[in-house]
């Protein structure tokens, strides 16, 4: 089980960006009804219980507006520091 945190104020909106919606293999993203301060409609998760924790959404969001947390007992992967620039 994973928790998908969406930082609504950092998002450019599902209609204007929508990369998270495109890359989610579970098709869990939809635009929410509430506009953020910048005038965009950020995504919300339809059914978080269906999230596999693949982290595609987090990796591909250009605005770092998504953070996926593992909430089960799986050991956290310690990623190598791969700063590419
Ligand atoms: S972690 Fe993967 S399955 Fe979960 S919401 Fe993101 S893209 Fe979808
Ligand atoms: S990829 Fe990021 S910026 Fe784009 S719609 Fe999703 S949360 Fe918003």
Image (cartoon, rainbow, N blue to C red):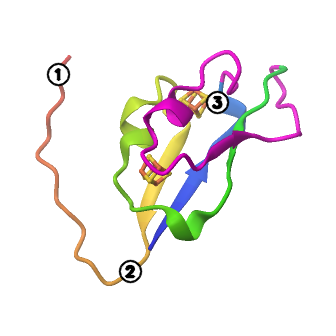
Residue 10 circle label: 3
Mark 2–mark 1 contact, CB under 8 Å? no
| Mark with earlier residue (2, 1) | 2
- Which residue is tagged 2? 72
How packed mark 3 is, by other alpha carbons closer than 10 Å (few <14, some 14-19, many 20 or more), is some
Q: In this view, does 83 lie to the left or right of 53?
A: left
In the structure shown, which secondary structural element does the residue marked by tag 3 occupy? helix
Taking the magenta stretch, the answer to whether it contains residue 7 is no
What separation in Å lies between label 2 and label 1 (alpha carbons)? Answer: 30 Å
Question: Which residues make up the magenta segment?
Answer: 12-38
Q: Is residue 29 left or right of residue 38?
A: left
Circle 2 or circle 1, nearest the eye: 2
Which residue: 38% across, 80% down? 72
In the structure shown, which secondary structural element does the residue marked by tag 2 occupy? loop
Which residue: 80% across, 20% down? 38
Mark 2–mark 3 contact, CB under 8 Å? no
| Mark with earlier residue (2, 3) | 3
Q: List x then y, in percent, for residue 1.
A: 44, 74
Q: List x then y, in percent, for residue 67.
A: 48, 49
Q: Is residue 16 left or right of residue 77?
A: right
Which residue: 20% across, 16% down? 85
How packed mark 1 is, by other alpha carbons closer than 10 Å (few <14, some 14-19, many 20 or more), is few
Q: List x then y, in percent, for residue 84.
A: 17, 21
Residue 84 circle label: 1
Q: In which quarter of the image is ligand 2?
A: top right
Farthest residue to the left: give it: 80
């Amino acid at each position: 089980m994973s928790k998908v945190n969406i930082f609504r104020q950092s998002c450019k909106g599902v209609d204007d960006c929508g990369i998270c919606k495109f890359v989610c293999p579970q098709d869990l993203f939809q635009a929410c009804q509430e506009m953020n301060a910048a005038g965009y409609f950020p995504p919300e998760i339809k059914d978080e219980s269906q999230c596999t924790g693949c982290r595609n959404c987090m990796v591909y969001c250009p605005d770092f507006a998504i953070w996926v947390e593992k909430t089960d007992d799986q050991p956290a992967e310690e990623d190598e520091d791969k700063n590419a620039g």
